[in-house]
Image (spheres, rainbow, N blue to C red):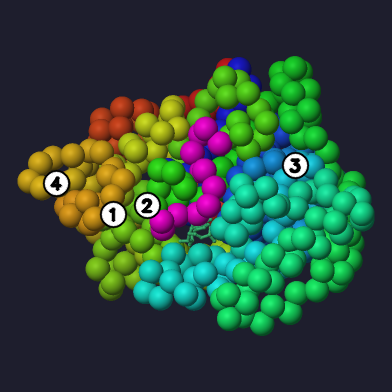
Amino acid sequence: MSTLAILGTQWGDEGKGKLVDFLAEPAKAVVRFQGGDNAGHTVKIGSEEFKLHLLPSGILRKGKLAIIGNGVIINPKVLINEIDGLAKRGIDCSSLRISDRANLIMPYHVMLDGAEERLKAGKQVGTTGRGIGPCYSDKVARIGIRMCDLIDEKVLKEKLSFIVDLKKRMLRAYDMDEGLDCDSIVREYLEYGNRLREYVTDTAVLLEKLLKKDSKILFEGAQGALLDVDFGTYPYVTSSNTIGGNIATGSGFPPKQIDRILGIAKGYTTRVGAGPFPTELPESESMELAKAGGEFGTTTGRMRRCGWLDLVVVSHSIRLSGIDTLALTKMDVLGKIDKIKICDHYILDGKKTSAFPASLEQLSKCEPVYKSFGSWGELSDSEIEKMKKRGRAALPVEIKKYLEHIEKILRIPVSAIGLGKERDRTVILRNIWPK
Ligand code: IMP
C-alpha cells in the first residue's frame, strides 16, 4: 500500500497545494494528472510564499520526482517561466518529468477561449482565459499537439499547417483578427521543445517502475469535483474530469493500485467564475469571509464567492471518487466568524434530498437546510502545538462539535485540519498515508 491521492471536493481552491506539500514528505513522486495552468496553488514555507500553476506542489521538496502526467494540458511558455522563477529562488527542477503524451496549449487556444466567452453574452462561464476548453476540445477532436511532437520539426510543421489554417477559419467566424502565422508558431514551439526536452519521458513507464519498487506515490488533483466536466455544475465547469477516475486515465496508472483517496474541503465553500452555488452568502457577508480568508484567485486575482460548507456537495464528491477520508482547511478563517452554519441537505419541491441534481433548473430550486455552530475564535500557536501533540483530545470543543457533525453526515473520518497558511499549521488527527 503506497499510493495516496488528494482531490478537491468543492469548486476548487480548497487548499490542496499546502496539504500536498505537507503530505509529500515520505513520497518518492508527486503526480499531476489533469487541468492546466488554470490551477493555482499557493504554498507557504517559512516566510516564503510560492504560487504554482503547472508544476506539481511536490517540486518544492528536495529529492521528489515531480511528474506532469498525460492528462495535464501544458502551456510550455508558462511552464518554462515557472521553472525559471523557481530557479531564481534556488529551487532546482531537475526532478521534473513531463509526459510525452501531454497535450499543449497553443496560441489559438487562448484566442478562442476569449472569443467563445465573449459571444456567450450573459451566459459566460467565467473561464480563466488560459485556453483550457479549446485545448481539451482539440485533444478529443484528435487535432491536438502533444509534447512528443515538439522534437520533430517535420511532424510539427505538417500538423500545424493543417491546424493553423483551420483555426484561422474559426477565428474569422468569430470576427477576430487571426494574426496567426504557422511558421512563427513552429519556431516558437520548437524552441520550447528544446528547452523542455530533458524532462520529457513516458511517465506511465516511470510510474510502473516506481510501483514495482513499492515507492510512495502522491497524486495531486487540480480544481474540485464540482468543476468536473461530467459531474460538476455543467456547463459552469472546467473541461477535464477532476474526480478519482481520472487519476488513472490522466497518468497511465492502474486504478486498482490507488490505495487511498483524501478529499479536501474548506471549512466553508468558495467558487470563482459564474454558476450556481446553493449556500452562497449575501454579498456583504461573502465579502467579509473573502477578506478574512484572502479569497482571491491565484490564477486570475478574482475575488471568490463565499458561502457555508455544503455537505450535499461534499457527499456528491465522496460518492464519485470513493473518498476515504477528509481534510478540512482554513478552519482558522472560519474561527473568525461568530455564528457558523453547515448545510446538511436540501429541500426540493417540498422533499428532503441529499442528491446533487444534474439540472441547474432543479438545483436553483433547492433550498439548503442549515445547522448552526458556535465559533472557536482565534487559536494561538501554543494551542495549535498542543493539538499537534495530543490530537483530537486537545481540540477546542466547538471544533470537535463541527467535526463530529460532518463525520456523522458524511460517514467518513476527518483526518486533518488546516489552521493557517504555513506548512506546520496543519493538525493531523489520524494516519493519512496508507500503511
Ligand atoms: P477554465 O478551467 O479556465 O475553462 O474555467 C472554467 C471554470 O472553472 C471557471 O469558472 C473557472 O473559474 C473555474 N476554475 C478553473 N480552474 C480553477 C481552479 O483551479 N480553482 C477554482 N476554479 C477554477
Horizontal side of residue 404 vs 155, given as left or right: left
Horizontal side of residue 304 vs 74, given as left or right: left
- Amino acid bearing label 2: Thr
- Amino acid bearing label 1: Leu
Local SS, label 4: strand
Indicate if the residue with disc 3 has its beta carbon within 8 Å of ligand 1.
Answer: no
Percent position of residue 94, x then y: 85, 46
Residue contact at pointers 2 and 1, CB within 8 angstroms? yes
Name the residue beneath numbered marker 4: 347
Camera-nearest residue between 238 and 341 = 238
Camera-nearest residue between 38 and 145 = 145
Horizontal side of residue 341 vs 288, given as left or right: left
Query: For residue 101, which numbered disc appears in the image?
Result: 3
Crowding at mark 4 (Cα within 10 Å: few <14, some 14-19, many 20+) = some
Give the residue drawn at x 63%, y 23%. Answer: 254
In the rendered image, residue 245 lying in the magenta stretch gets the answer yes
Name the residue beneath numbered marker 2: 233
Work out whether mark 1 precedes mark 3 in sequence or the reverse, and give the earlier one. 3
Crowding at mark 3 (Cα within 10 Å: few <14, some 14-19, many 20+) = many
- Amino acid bearing label 3: Arg
Real-space CA distance between mark 1 and mark 3, rounded to the nearest whole angstrom: 35 Å
Q: Which residues are magenta?
A: 235-246
Name the residue beneath numbered marker 1: 360
